[in-house]
Image (cartoon, helix red, strand yellow):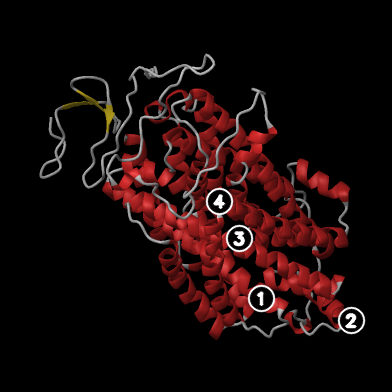
Amino acid sequence: MELFKGPHKRNKQHVLPNSPITETKGGRYPSLNFPGIPQPALMKAEQDGDIHEEDSPQDDGIETNQYSSISPPASPVAQEELFTTYFEDKVPIPESANQVFSFRKLWAFTGPGFLMSIAYLDPGNIESDLQSGAKAGFKLLWVLLLATIIGLLLQRLAARLGVVTGMHLAEVCNRQYPTVPRILLWLMVELAIIGSDMQEVIGCAIALNLLSVGRIPLWAGVLITITDTFVFLFLDKYGLRKLEAFFGFLITVMAISFGYEYVVAGPDQGQLLKGMFVPYCAGCGPLQLEQAVGIVGAVIMPHNIYLHSALVKSRDIDRKNKKEVKEANKYYFIESTVALFISFLINVFVVAVFAEAFYDKTNIQVREQCNATGSPHADLFPANNETLEVDIYKGGVVLGCVFGPAALFIWAIGILAAGQSSTMTGTYSGQFVMEGFLNLRWSRFARVLLTRSIAITPTLLVAIFQDVQHLTGMNDFLNVLQSMQLPFALIPILTFTSLTSIMNDFANGMVWKISGGIVILLPICASYATWFGTVWLLWGFPAWTLAAGFKWDYLVTQTFTY
C-alpha cells in the first residue's frame, strides 16, 4: 500500500499499528520511510522482541549480537565520521582480567560525563544558586539534590541511546520523525542553545569586568568572549583526551574558586545537612517556591541531553558485542555519577556561601559593609531596608565587601571558568544538533560564528545602552526560555529508549518507563508553571497558553503516534 504520493513512495509493506517501524512483505526487517529523510541502513531485529544472532565468532562464551535497529546511513558520505570536531580519533578501551570492575576501563570511559556536567555549572546555574542561598538560605538544598538526581537519570538515558544505537538523539529524531515535528524539534533545541550561549557570554563579560576592576567595559567583555572561543576550539587539534583534560582543568578551577569562598564563609554544617536531606521549607512563600522551580529549570538543560548522547560515541565500542555494550553503559553511568556529584558539590558551595553570609540581609546592611571596607561599589545597594537581591555581578561585589578583595577576584575567576567551559560545550551541542537534524555539515568555526552572531546582538545592545543590572537580569528571562524547551528533549529520549525496535535488549522496562515518565513530568510541570506565571505577569495569560499548549501537544501527539 502506498503511504505517500509523488516522488516519495513506499514499497509494498505491512505497516505496524501506531509505529514508524514497517514490516516488509518478504520478512521481518524494520525500516523507515519518511519524505526527504535519508533512509538508514536498518539492522535486522525480530518483531517479537528477540534479537537476531549474528553468525560471528564467540568471545569467551559471550555471543556477539547486533544491537539497535538503527545505524548510520550507508551512503558514501556517511561512511566517514559525521562529526570531525570531536570524533577524529576514538579512545580505545583496554582489556581487563577483572570482569566486575576495572579502574583502567573507567579511566578510558572518563571524559564525556565531565563535559556533560559543565552544563550544571554554567553561569545560569551559578546565578540560580546564589539567589537560592540569598532568598531561602539552606532550605532549598534538597531541591538542588533532587534536580541533580533527576538530571543523572536523564543523562543515563541519553548515554544509553548513544552507546546502543551508535547514534545521538538528533540523528535518531531525524530518522524517526517526519518533516514537521523534526523541524519543530530542531528549532526548539536551537533556541535553547542560543539562550544558553547568551548566558555564557553574559557570565564571561561580567567576570572580565570584575577582574579588570571595571577597566574592561561590559560590551568589550562580550566581544572578547565571542572571539576567545575560536582560540580554545583549536585545542581539539591536539587530541580528544587533551581536550577533555582542558575541560577537567576548568572544572578544577571552579571547584577551587568556589571552594575557597565556602571555606572563607564557614557555613553552619548542621543547617546545611538539614537543608540538603530534609525535604521541607519552613516559612517559605511564593518567592521561595519560584526559586525552587528556577533551580530545577536551571539544572536540567534540554540541549545537554543531545550533547551527552553524542559525546559517548567517542569511545571505541563494538556494538555487535552485547558484553561490550553492557559494560560501556555501566562505566558511563559510574562516570556520570562521579561528574554530577562533583558539580553538585560546587553548586552547594555557592548556595552555602550566600545562605550563610547574605540570607535575610537588607540593602542598607550590605551598603554599610561596603562603605566600611572602602569598596567603590557601595552605591549599587540603595539605602533602604528591602531584602538584598543579588546576581552574578552583585554577588562578586558583596563577597568583596564582606570577605575582602581576594574573594571578589576568585569569584570572578570561577565565573570566567564556568562561562568559558559552557561556551565550548554549547558549541559542540549546536554542531551535533544541526548536523543530526538537518544532515548539514558545518565547520566548528562557522557554527560558532552563526550562534555567536545571534547571541551577540541583544547582549551587546544591552551591554552598550544599559547597565550591568539589565545585563544580569537577562539571565532570569533566559532560564525561563530554556525551561520551555524541556519537553522537546525529554519526551523523545524517553520514547526512543523505550522502543525495543531501537534499543532491543537495552530498552527501558516497565518500571523505567513509569518512573521515567514521572521523572520527566516533574521538571516539565515545574518549568511550565514558572513560565505561565511569568507570561501572566508580563503579557497576559490566554493567548500564550494556547500557543504553548499547541506546540507541546503537537509534539506529544507525533511522538506517541509513532
Residue identifier under label 4: 240
State yes or no: discs 3 and 2 in contact (Cβ < 8 Å).
no
Sequence-first disc among 2 and 4: 4
Three-letter code for the amino acid on which mark 3 is drawn? Ser
The answer to which of marks 1 and 2 sits earlier in the sequence is: 1
Q: CA distance from mark 1 to mark 3?
A: 15 Å
> Circles 2 and 4: CB distance less than 8 Å?
no
C-alpha span from label 2 to label 4 = 50 Å
Circle 2 residue: 372
- For marks 4 and 1, the one nearer the N-term is 1
Disc number for residue 208 = 1
Q: Name the element at disc 1.
A: helix
**Which residue is located at x 14 percent, y 28 percent?**
12
3D distance between C-alphas at marks 4 and 1? 28 Å
Q: Residue at x 46, y 32 (%)?
A: 164
Image coords of residue 151 (percent x, y): 59, 44
Mark 3 crowd level (few <14, some 14–19, many ≥20, 10 Å Cα): many
217, 514: nearer the viewer: 217
Residue at the left extreme, as displayed: 6
Name the element at disc 4: helix
Q: Is residue 98 above or below residue 185?
A: above
Observer-nearest residue: 479 or 34? Answer: 34
Q: Position of residue 276 (x, y in %)?
A: 76, 45
Q: Position of residue 515 (x, y in %)?
A: 55, 31
* Marked residue nearer the N-terminal end (3 or 4): 4
Q: CA distance from mark 3 to mark 4?
A: 15 Å
Q: Amino acid at mark 2?
A: Ala
- Mark 2 closeness class: few <14, some 14–19, many ≥20 residues within 10 Å: few
Q: Residue at x 46, y 40 (%)?
A: 493
